Image (cartoon, rainbow, N blue to C red):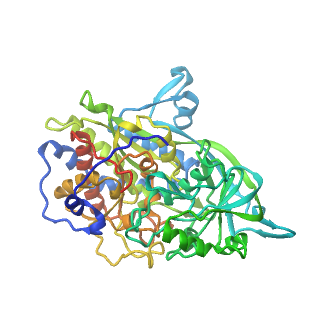
């Protein structure tokens, strides 16, 4: 993964001032200033009535939950294209006629073989796992053990049956910058690796893995990619035996009853991960490890010494069988529009403003409306596009010097698929992308929910609160937001940057761009009881708060676009 490496040095005093490591919450003064006159035309255009109108449409029964690769999703995309067009953004891509016509049937082939478009095609595989036929089998001598769901979960777009030896590979992490490598001195080529979720020393504030916060190395994506780079043919991933938090599967089970039971799985056609990742329980993992290997003791030793404890598990042979009930390949679309910068030099650099437009669809008469998740964020991107174009054309307005790319991603709910695709197929160079503002759920007051129960403090007044996620990786970015907040007066919160249980850092579309070393924050108002429930509806949105968040991002985006110095990315916080 090649990306720019930017290094910034900060004094200890400066770090105390800017870093959320030293305070989980920064409470803003609610005595606010007036924005500069050159920015007021766009600022004044951000109105709650228009926000409510757009959220209500996106979360309507007509769009039926906006599940990617459905007719309702295509209807949503058509509407989003119209909003970008009406706002005055420039189309950025060239689409073959056949692709463009899918969403714009009025286009005739005689018009042109290619059309300037607001669409980036994202080829996806849609599939339904056959849980009755998917299994994991252990053979040891003459004995066999076979597991199916819920003891094991196999979700992979292709049918396969594979066999292999098993190698325990710790946390499955290779972090050369931290001088840590679970794969040191072992050969896993052609083998199946058994690894822990998360990362070492998660309860140690002094851990090289960013203290008690998660780093990129804790993600299943990075673990699978690393295993594949070392030649493994499959990954078995289990909860850490000594964990003090729910496993990833435990978190999912907390809200499983609320989810759409007919949701398909989806994957990128050209996914960077070519090997299957199989989730197993601790009981299954202990059986695979056998009586002579204690996974709990190995985890404790890794956490104590930060030295690899990887080893071949002798005599074990694993078989993994995967079959899908059905599968098809089709295109979904990221919706993309450009506001070109005004400076001859800086216009070649890019600020991204993004959100995802999909949600979880419907099941019969039940609709997962996704008003907060993420009609709110999608509406925020549209509102910013309108405001910035208005400001650029106003008599006393200002144009951004750098170019601003407005992006609405597809298939975030299916695994950040649209954003992973764009990060690997950028429409403007990643190396000259200076910052990303990503909206995902910016419309509610945070309150206790099944997601956060016992894991994070929600006993707070959140009516004016905005969570910023990613500050460890760019204190410069954070300083800009704080500076611009003097005009808005929101309460800025960084609790989720100190979380190792909820995996928040990995769960929205800024994450693939963090992997490319782009300063990228997730702007987020927090979880609530309606999260991924059919009750996430437009009438529950706090539109006044939402407007304040969009105004703050408006000022922040202009700062990113116009400041001489771009925010720096910290590779190892």
Q: Quadrant of the C terminus?
A: bottom left
Image: 493 above or below 188: below
Residue 251's spot in the image, x, y percent? 53, 71
At a point 26% along the width and 44% down the height, the residue shown is 560
Residue drawn at 52 percent across, 43 percent down: 421
Where residue 36 sits: x, y (%)? 13, 47
Q: Residue furthest right?
A: 142
Is residue 379 shown to the viewer in this render? yes
Residue at horizontal 51%, vertical 58%? 219
| Depth order, front residue of 87/341 | 341
Question: Residue 145: horizontal and vertical position, in percent?
Answer: 79, 70
| Count of picture labels | 0
Q: Quadrant of residue 376?
A: bottom left
Q: Answer with the quarter of the image where residue 184 lies.
A: bottom right
103 or 270, nearer to the observer: 270
Q: Is residue 24 left or right of residue 453?
A: left
């Amino acid at each position: 993964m090649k990306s720019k490496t930017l290094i910034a040095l900060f004094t200890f005093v400066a770090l105390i001032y800017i870093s959320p490591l030293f305070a989980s919450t920064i409470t803003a003064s609610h005595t606010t200033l007036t924005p500069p006159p050159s920015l007021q035309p766009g600022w004044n255009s951000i109105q709650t009535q228009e926000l409510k109108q757009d959220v209500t449409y996106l979360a309507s029964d007509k769009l039926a939950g906006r599940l990617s690769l459905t007719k309702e999703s295509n209807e949503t995309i058509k509407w989003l294209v119209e909003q970008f067009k009406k706002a005055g953004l420039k189309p950025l891509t060239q689409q073959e006629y056949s692709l463009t016509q899918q969403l714009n049937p009025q286009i005739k082939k005689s018009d042109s073989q290619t059309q300037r478009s607001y669409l980036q095609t994202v080829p996806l595989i849609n599939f339904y796992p056959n849980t009755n036929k998917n299994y994991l089998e252990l053979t040891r001598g003459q004995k066999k053990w076979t597991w199916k769901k819920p003891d094991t979960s196999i979700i992979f777009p292709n049918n396969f049956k594979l066999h292999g030896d098993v190698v325990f590979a710790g946390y499955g992490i290779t972090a050369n910058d931290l001088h840590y490598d679970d794969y040191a001195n072992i050969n896993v080529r052609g083998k199946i690796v058994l690894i822990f979720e998360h990362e070492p020393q998660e309860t140690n504030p002094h851990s090289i893995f960013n203290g008690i916060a998660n780093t990129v190395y804790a993600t299943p994506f990075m673990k699978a990619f690393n295993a594949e780079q070392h030649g493994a043919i499959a990954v078995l991933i289990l909860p850490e035996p000594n964990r003090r938090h729910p496993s990833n599967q435990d978190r999912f089970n907390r809200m499983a009853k609320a989810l759409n039971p007919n949701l398909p799985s989806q994957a990128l056609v050209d996914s960077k991960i070519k090997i299957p990742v199989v989730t197993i329980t601790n009981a299954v993992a202990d059986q695979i490890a056998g009586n002579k290997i204690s996974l709990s003791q190995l985890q404790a030793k890794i956490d104590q010494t930060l030295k690899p404890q990887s080893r071949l598990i002798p005599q074990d042979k694993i078989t993994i069988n995967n079959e899908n009930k059905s599968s098809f390949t089709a295109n979904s679309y990221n919706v993309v529009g450009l506001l070109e910068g005004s400076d001859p030099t800086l216009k070649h650099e890019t600020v991204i403003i993004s959100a995802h437009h999909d949600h979880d669809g419907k099941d019969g008469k039940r609709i997962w409306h996704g008003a907060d998740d993420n009609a709110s964020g999608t509406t925020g991107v549209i509102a910013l596009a309108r405001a910035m174009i208005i400001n650029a054309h106003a008599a006393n307005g200002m144009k951004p010097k750098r170019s601003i790319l407005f992006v609405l991603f597809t298939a975030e709910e299916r695994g950040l698929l649209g954003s992973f695709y764009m990060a690997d197929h950028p429409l403007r160079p990643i190396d000259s992308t200076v910052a990303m503002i990503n909206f995902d759920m910016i419309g509610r007051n945070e309150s206790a929910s099944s997601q956060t129960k016992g894991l994070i403090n929600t006993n707070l007044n959140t009516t004016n609160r905005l969570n910023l996620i990613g500050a460890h990786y760019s204190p410069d970015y954070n300083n800009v937001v704080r500076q611009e907040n003097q005009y808005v007066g929101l309460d800025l919160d960084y609790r989720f940057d100190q979380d190792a249980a909820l995996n928040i850092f990995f769960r929205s579309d800024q994450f693939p761009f963090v992997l490319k070393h782009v300063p990228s924050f997730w702007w987020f108002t927090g979880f609530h009881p309606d999260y991924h429930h059919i009750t996430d509806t437009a009438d529950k949105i706090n539109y006044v708060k939402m407007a304040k968040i969009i105004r703050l991002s408006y000022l922040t985006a202009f700062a990113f676009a116009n400041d001489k110095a771009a925010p720096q990315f910290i590779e190892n916080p």
